[in-house]
Image (cartoon, grey):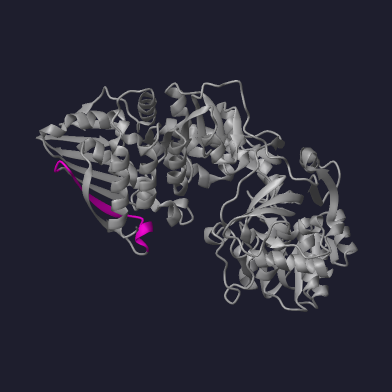
């Protein structure tokens, strides 16, 4: 299928042929009929992508801070690889569209195949022939509303939510600054709501279009325009000013204050500078409000991804119900959008639309992309002449896969890459192109059942690990699965049963046990010489509440990351865990505790304490391991330095062992006698730790 993308590292807009996306339980697969280009937002995205690294850093200092923090915890080399991997990707464009439903997930209600729906959401309602969209970002289209009109629903909802933030009743006076597409929609919605509207723009064409729709509007001429607004508002000023313009300058926000009455509201919808002077806002006691995208529910994982709606009695106007309002207003004729469309381009020629916007060769407003009437064919996995059945199949095309894991495979001499599968076709396409895979798919089963594939790498969200690993083992494949192996004892037993009857071998990406410094540390304390005591301190750092580690469905931080540290303790003690105690820190759900302490007892009498702490400074290294026993003492500091009996070891390679782990896996599938009992031992220990913490 065709999809419009902006290369993240720079370059021109591209229309790519990519695999179709797949859907999850709460998602809907839609064949696109029309999509609307949001010129302001999308041009800003392309401008940022095409800027230099210095310009990107100035525009996104928050990301710079993340890079600096990662460099401190993971090292400069690994951080550079991660950044390069991200810059090598593509950003999907588009977020306001309409199409026909092809399929729905098992948890979706109220939407059925064959139904026409308006769709929204950056990264999902893309300019693409097929979209995989969360069900609450889809709204059925009323009869009589065309696909082109329905494609305005998301952009229209942005305007509607901004208007709602002004909290005005019929007869109120509202000024709209900026009469681009968003401003035109805002002005029309205000008129439809019984408000009196005054539109302002610096361009004559925009003002004329507003006037043609019956809106009072003027080109901004400073004081004369202010005087006109005062006359229009009977000398009081506007009850609210809605800023729909976009500019780095703060002049627009200051201009809004000049148009307000005493105690009026300024609503910021557009991206404008906000370096404000106090006096204009203080003297009139103005309120400044911001409109966040389409309405309540936006950026909330439980709403958008999990399909958990808000009761209408508590949140009347969610983003989905704003979609409904826009569609109903269009259906009733109270909101007209057809005349806002100035250009049409077929999806295959979408790059021409962005070229038009960039060079300003002619006036434009609403630009609609059109699509073929039929569903794009689903391509089969690409076949080659290779018949050896020794290739690598890859499931999951995320940043860790491309930036860390796959380079380790290549460095270990494994490069016979055959097929990659990803739920998002765009990521599979980019991954395949960059790393030399011969085929792509949205279906993991195609990778697993490909006769050319002998080894399957599973690097997907944690909740899918066990199922995919078991499926691959039953197909007789060798399996590398990223940690964790399973999120429940039931999942683990299913994997164990599949392994017992499989000709393939199972390996989990617990790389730290293979790190040269851990190997040297473990050899200092041979198991036959007696038990040891291990103290493992992890400066985990805080995470955004919206991070996927906060998703209990993915196992939280304990099963998602602390499994590494349990496994490392097991490797150092050279003995499996027989008993675990756990104590969560902080308040709230134990499964999502930001800090906790685990106490492990190993079969040979060794004991270990893992202190996983979220409140430490970024300047402190992430991992610190101290081992005492057998008359000896050793310290491993953040996989950078190793000290044994007070002497720094200088001839041991630093690093967390990704290459060494893959090399061990390579030797294992090549027939070398490598002990893998730790794979299931560690999985059981981790699940026992979760149970002790009260999470399973």
| Residue 73 rendering spot, x and y as whole percentages | 38, 39
| Residue 124 rendering spot, x and y as whole percentages | 64, 50
Q: Is residue 107 magenta?
A: no
Task: Inspect this view and state whether residue 42 appears.
Answer: yes
Image quadrant in which the N terminus is located: top right
| Residue 453 rendering spot, x and y as whole percentages | 51, 29
Task: Inspect this view and state whether residue 88 appears.
Answer: no
Image quadrant in which the C terminus is located: bottom left
Q: Give the left or right position of residue 279, taking residue 652 as reference.
A: right
Q: Quadrant of residue 55?
A: top right
Which residue is at 83% across, 60% downward? 337
Q: Give the left or right position of residue 474, taking residue 695 as reference.
A: right
Q: In this view, does 507 lie above or below 303?
A: above
| Residue 589 rendering spot, x and y as whole percentages | 37, 63
Q: Does the magenta stretch include residue 598?
A: yes
Q: In the depicted view, which residue is nearer to us: 622 or 145?
A: 145
Q: In this view, does 29 lie above or below 505?
A: below
Residue range in magenta is 589-605
Which residue is at 78% across, 68% downward? 329
Q: Is residue 559 above or below residue 413?
A: below
Residue reaching furthest right?
212
Which residue is at 60% across, 50% downward? 23
Residue reaching furthest left?
631
Which residue is at 32% across, 35% downward? 512
Q: Quadrant of residue 387?
A: top right
Q: Give the left or right position of residue 60, taking residue 174 as reference.
A: left
């Amino acid at each position: 299928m065709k999809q419009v993308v902006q290369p993240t590292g720079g370059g021109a807009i591209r229309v790519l042929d990519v695999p179709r996306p797949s859907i999850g339980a709460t998602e809907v697969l839609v064949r696109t009929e029309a999509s609307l280009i949001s010129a302001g937002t999308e041009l800003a995205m392309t401008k940022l992508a095409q800027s230099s690294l210095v310009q990107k850093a100035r525009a996104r200092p928050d990301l710079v801070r993340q890079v600096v923090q990662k460099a401190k915890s993971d090292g400069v080399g690994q951080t550079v690889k991660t950044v390069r991997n991200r810059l090598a990707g593509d950003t999907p464009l588009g977020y306001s569209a309409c199409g026909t439903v092809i399929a729905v997930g098992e948890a979706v209600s109220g939407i059925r195949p064959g139904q026409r729906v308006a769709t929204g959401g950056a990264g999902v309602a893309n300019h693409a022939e097929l979209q995989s969209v969360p069900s609450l970002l889809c709204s059925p289209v009323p009869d009589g509303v065309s696909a082109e009109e329905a494609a305005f629903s998301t952009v229209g909802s942005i305007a509607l939510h901004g208007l709602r933030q002004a909290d005005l009743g019929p007869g109120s006076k509202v000024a709209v600054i900026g009469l681009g597409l968003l401003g035109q929609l805002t002005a029309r919605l205000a008129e439809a709501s019984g408000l009196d509207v005054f539109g302002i723009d610096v361009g004559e064409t925009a003002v004329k279009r507003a006037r043609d729709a019956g809106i009072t509007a003027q080109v901004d001429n400073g004081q004369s325009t202010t005087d006109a607004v005062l006359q229009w508002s009977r000398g009081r000023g506007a009850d609210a000013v809605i800023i729909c313009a976009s500019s780095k300058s703060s002049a627009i926000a200051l201009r809004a204050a000049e148009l307000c009455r005493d105690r009026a509201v300024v609503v910021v919808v557009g991206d404008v500078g906000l370096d404000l002077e106090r006096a204009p806002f203080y003297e009139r006691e103005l309120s400044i409000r911001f409109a966040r995208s389409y309405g309540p529910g936006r950026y909330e994982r439980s709403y958008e991804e999990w399909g958990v709606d808000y009761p209408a009695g508590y949140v009347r106007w969610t983003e989905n119900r704003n979609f409904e309002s826009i569609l109903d207003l269009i259906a009733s004729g109270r909101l007209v959008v057809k005349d806002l469309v100035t250009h049409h381009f077929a999806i295959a020629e979408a790059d021409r639309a962005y070229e038009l916007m960039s060079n300003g060769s002619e006036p434009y407003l609403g630009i609609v992309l059109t699509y073929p009437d039929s569903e794009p064919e689903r391509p089969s996995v690409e076949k080659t002449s290779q018949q050896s059945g020794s290739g690598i199949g890859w499931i999951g095309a995320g940043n860790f896969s491309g930036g860390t894991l796959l380079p380790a495979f290549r460095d270990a001499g494994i490069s016979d890459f055959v097929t990659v599968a990803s739920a998002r076709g765009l990521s599979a396409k980019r991954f395949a192109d960059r790393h030399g895979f011969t085929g792509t798919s949205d279906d993991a089963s195609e990778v697993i059942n490909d006769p050319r594939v002998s080894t399957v790498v599973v690097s997907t969200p944690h909740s899918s690990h066990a199922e995919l690993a078991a499926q691959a083992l039953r197909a007789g494949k060798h399996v590398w699965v990223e940690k964790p192996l399973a999120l429940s004892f039931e999942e683990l037993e299913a994997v164990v049963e599949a392994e017992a009857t499989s000709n393939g071998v199972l390996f989990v990406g617990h790389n730290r046990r293979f790190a040269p410094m851990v190997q040297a540390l473990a050899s200092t304390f041979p198991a036959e010489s007696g038990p040891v005591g291990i103290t493992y301190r992890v400066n985990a750092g805080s995470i955004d509440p919206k991070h996927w580690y906060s998703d209990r469905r993915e196992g939280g931080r304990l099963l998602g990351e602390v499994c590494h540290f349990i496994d490392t303790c097991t490797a150092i003690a050279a003995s499996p865990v027989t008993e675990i105690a756990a104590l969560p820190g902080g308040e709230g759900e134990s499964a999502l505790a930001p800090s906790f302490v685990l106490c492990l007892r190993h079969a040979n009498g060794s004991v270990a304490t893992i202190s996983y702490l979220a409140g430490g400074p970024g300047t402190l290294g992430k991992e610190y391991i101290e081992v005492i026993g057998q008359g000896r003492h050793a310290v491993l500091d953040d996989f950078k330095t190793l000290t044994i009996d007070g002497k720094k070891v200088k001839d041991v390679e630093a690093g967390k062992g990704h290459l060494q782990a893959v090399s061990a896996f390579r030797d294992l599938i090549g027939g070398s006698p490598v002990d893998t009992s730790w794979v299931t031992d560690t999985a059981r220990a981790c699940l026992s730790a979760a149970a002790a913490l009260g999470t399973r």
